[in-house]
Amino acid sequence: MIVQIDPKHPQPRRIDQIVDVLRDGGLVAYPTDTVYGIGCDVHNHDAIVRLKRLVSDLKDAPEHAPLSFICRGMSEISEYAHIDDQTYRFMKRLLPGPYTFILEATKGVPSVMRKHRSTVGVRVPDHPVPIQLVERLRHPIATTSAATRDGELIADPWTLEDIYGHALDLVVDGDYVFPEPSTVIDFTGDGPVLVREGKGDIQGLEFVEVVAGEEPTAD
């Protein structure tokens, strides 16, 4: 099912409708400031398992492939990830925005997501729809990027419905998104490491090193 929403001024009744699906354990596709994401309530174990299987089946990735958290802001991130003062200041400069930060996970991350890793990817998108969803849900959305088997990011809800419709409970039509992956920054070492340069501006930012490594499946 496709539900239309105003991407700039989301209608509260539409937000409530989407959140109801998430609370019931549903998988929802929705727009962000980088790509369309597919997500679920981070505290619904069965929904997380469904999402991991979807990633495995349709994206040819292992079921333990990383998912990212869509969060409301820094205070919520700190419930799920360890953040020192220097990292906090770095992140605060960039959020909300098209960045994914890799951090050491706390015990707040559900065990089903900590089974194969001790880190978590977090995002605070600069987009009203996902922000209002997590505000209404009152905790994060576990998410992965919507892409074809060939890795091509999906830019519109109709293609999403065609490819993923059988596995999703709801597709949010937030209009066409010009897909561009987020910039990924790893804070699990002695300083920020640029893992992937994406949509986020990195001018003026200093990194310990630039590496090619495993990226979150949420962009």
Image (tube, rainbow, N blue to C red):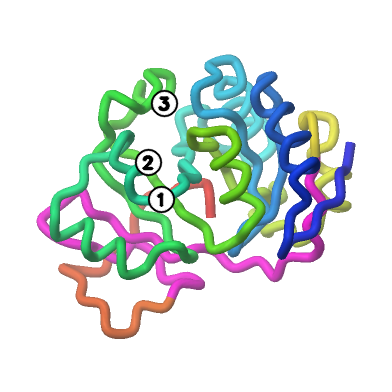
Q: Is residue 7 above or below residue 173?
A: below
Magenta span includes 18: no
Q: Label 2's element? A: helix
- What is the three-letter code of the residue carrying label 2? Glu
- What is the three-letter code of the residue carrying label 3? Met
Residue 113 is marked as: 3
Q: Nearer the viewer, residue 164 or 131?
A: 131
Q: Is residue 55 above or below residue 49?
A: below
In the image, what residue occupies the spot 69% across and 55% down? 31
Report which quarter residue 203 is drawn in.
Answer: bottom left
Q: Is residue 57 above or below residue 88?
A: above
Residue 64 is situated, as x and y percent measured from the top left of the image, at 45, 29
Find the distance from the CA under tag 1 to the CA under tag 2: 6 Å
Question: The N terminus lies in which quarter of the figure?
Answer: top right
Residue 76 is marked as: 2
Residue 185 is situated, as x and y percent measured from the top left of the image, at 32, 60
Q: Label 3's element? A: helix
Q: Main secondary structure of the magenta part?
A: loop
Per the image, the residue denoted by label 1 is 73
Q: Residues within 10 Å of mark 2 (few under 14, many from 20)?
A: some
Q: Label 1's element? A: loop
Residue 143 is situated, as x and y percent measured from the top left of the image, at 56, 40
Q: Are marks 1 and 2 in contact (CB under 8 Å)?
A: yes
Range drawn in magenta: 171-200
Magenta span includes 177: yes
Q: Are marks 2 and 3 in contact (CB under 8 Å)?
A: no
